[in-house]
Image (spheres, rainbow, N blue to C red):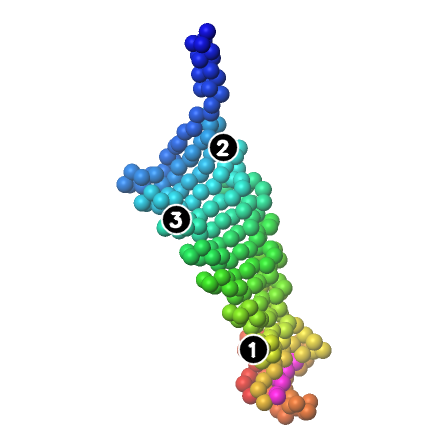
Amino acid sequence: MIRIHLIFYLLFLFGGCKLKSRKVVEAYNNGKPKIEHIYPNKNDTTTYTYQVYYRDGKLMYTGKVIKGKYVDEKKAYYPDGKIERIEKLFYPVTLNDSLYDCQVFNYWNNGLIESSYTYKNNKLNGTEFDYDSLGRLVRTDDYINGKLDGKEIHFFPSGKVRELEYVKNDSAYGFAYDFNEAGDTTSAIVHYGFSIKGVFCKRWLQKNLIQTGSYGDSKRSFVIWKWINKDNRVIKKLVDHGKNGVYTPPLY
């Protein structure tokens, strides 16, 4: 009776277990695996762990595939085994990566985060954060549909704002400011493409001077540069016909 029960137990044990298997998809010329699939169930080749190795056999990259699509996270590793990059997928992704939406985290080799950003609709969207190797925030950039749009901010190591620039359609557009660590504005400029009462460029110079640039006619065929003192009096004026339609703010 005991023997019969043992037989039924072994049949249940081995019959109910899913046998794992490994498949070397590509190998180095030294015989070590380069790409390998690890199947939790050898009878289901649509679900597996995808692993890529360095030539010395250390793990370079890993991802999880379920029913023929990447899911959860993709991870990349430095040659010493430390994590280099994590891509957190928002939904299953086809193996050809034709549509790839995720949140990305890159890491310095010391384990601290280097940058983070988000892909939506297969394009950069939202704010990108960049950090130095000590973990301090050094820069942020706003993106909409893959292009810079919003603010670009640079930071002092103390965390205070060093530069603030407004951007649109991948270009500086509007006001840009420089600050010292006390929070005082050290310089400011209005970039091309942004016009306030006909003034498309405005710079705050030393010695309490302001430089403005305004188009001289409706065809924008020339620019009039003015230097204005603290009493709002024009002390210098210059007509500029530009070069190939480009106007560069002249030095005083």
| Residue 226 image point, x, y percent | 63, 86
Quote the CA–CA distance across marks 3 and 1.
40 Å
Amino acid type, residue under disc 3 in the picture: Gly
Q: Secondary structure at mark 1?
A: loop
Q: Nearer the observer, disc 2 or disc 3?
A: 3
Q: Main secondary structure of the magenta part?
A: strand
Task: Work out which residue is located at the far left of the displayed protein and give it.
Answer: 30
Q: Which residue is mark 1?
A: 180
Compared to residue 247, the image places residue 54 above or below, namely above
Q: Which residue is mark 3?
A: 81
Taking the spot 57% from the left edge, 67% from the top edge, the residue there is 153
Q: Quadrant of residue 39?
A: top left
Taking the spot 49% from the left edge, 21% from the top edge, the residue there is 16
Residue 55 appears in the rendering: yes
Taking the spot 63% from the left edge, 78% from the top edge, the residue there is 201
Task: Work out which residue is located at the far right of the displayed protein and give it.
Answer: 197
Amino acid type, residue under disc 1 in the picture: Asn
Horizontal side of 58 relative to 65 (left or right) equals left
Horizontal side of 2 relative to 94 (left or right) equals left
Taking the spot 59% from the left edge, 59% from the top edge, the residue there is 127
Residue 223 appears in the rendering: no
Q: Which residue is mark 2?
A: 47
